[in-house]
Amino acid sequence: MVEKICRDLEPHQPLIISGLAYGIDIHAHKQALHFGLATIGVMGSGIDIIYPAAHKETARKMINHGGLLTENHFGTKPDAHNFPARNRIIAGTL
C-alpha cells in the first residue's frame, strides 16, 4: 500500500517525513527513495546514533534526498522518553 501511495504522490513531489522506525516508517522512507521523493527521518537519538541500526543504509541514502533531523545532542541514546518529542516534530505541533 505504501508503494501505491508514493507512486500516486510522485507527480506532486511531496516531502515524506517519518520516524525511521520499524514498520510503516521505514517502508515510507524506502518507497520515497525508490520514487525519487524527498524524505526526512526524525530521530529520537543523537544524529550520530541511527536507531534502529538495521536502517543505517536507508538513513545514509536519505542524507542526499531529504535528510535526518533531531533535536538531541550527539551521543543521545534512543531512550523511550525521547520518542514523544520526536513524534511532536513529525506531527508538526509544539
Image (tube, rainbow, N blue to C red):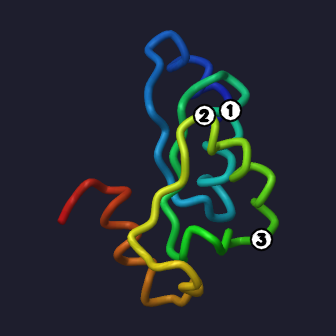
Q: CA distance from mark 2 to mark 3?
A: 19 Å
Q: Secondary structure at mark 3?
A: helix
The image's mark for residue 69 is none
User: Which residue was labeled with disc 3?
Assistant: 53
- Expressed as whole percent of the image width and height from the top left, the position of residue 81 reads 43, 89
Q: CA distance from mark 3 to mark 1?
A: 18 Å
Image-based side of 13 in relation to 60, left or right: left
Q: Is residue 11 above or below residue 18?
A: above
The image's mark for residue 33 is 1
Residue drawn at (76%, 60%), measured in percent from left and top?
55
Q: Amino acid at mark 3?
A: Ala
Image-based side of 22 in relation to 77, left or right: right
Q: Is residue 8 above or below residue 63?
A: above
Q: Amino acid at mark 2?
A: His
Q: Secondary structure at mark 2?
A: loop
User: Which residue was labeled with disc 2?
Assistant: 65
Residue drawn at (21%, 60%), measured in percent from left and top?
93
Badge nearest the viewer, 2 or 1: 2
Residue density around tag 2, few if under 14, some if 14–19, many if 20 or more, within 10 Å: some
Sequence order check: which comes first, mark 2 or mark 3?
A: 3
Residue density around tag 1, few if under 14, some if 14–19, many if 20 or more, within 10 Å: many
Q: Quadrant of the C terminus?
A: bottom left
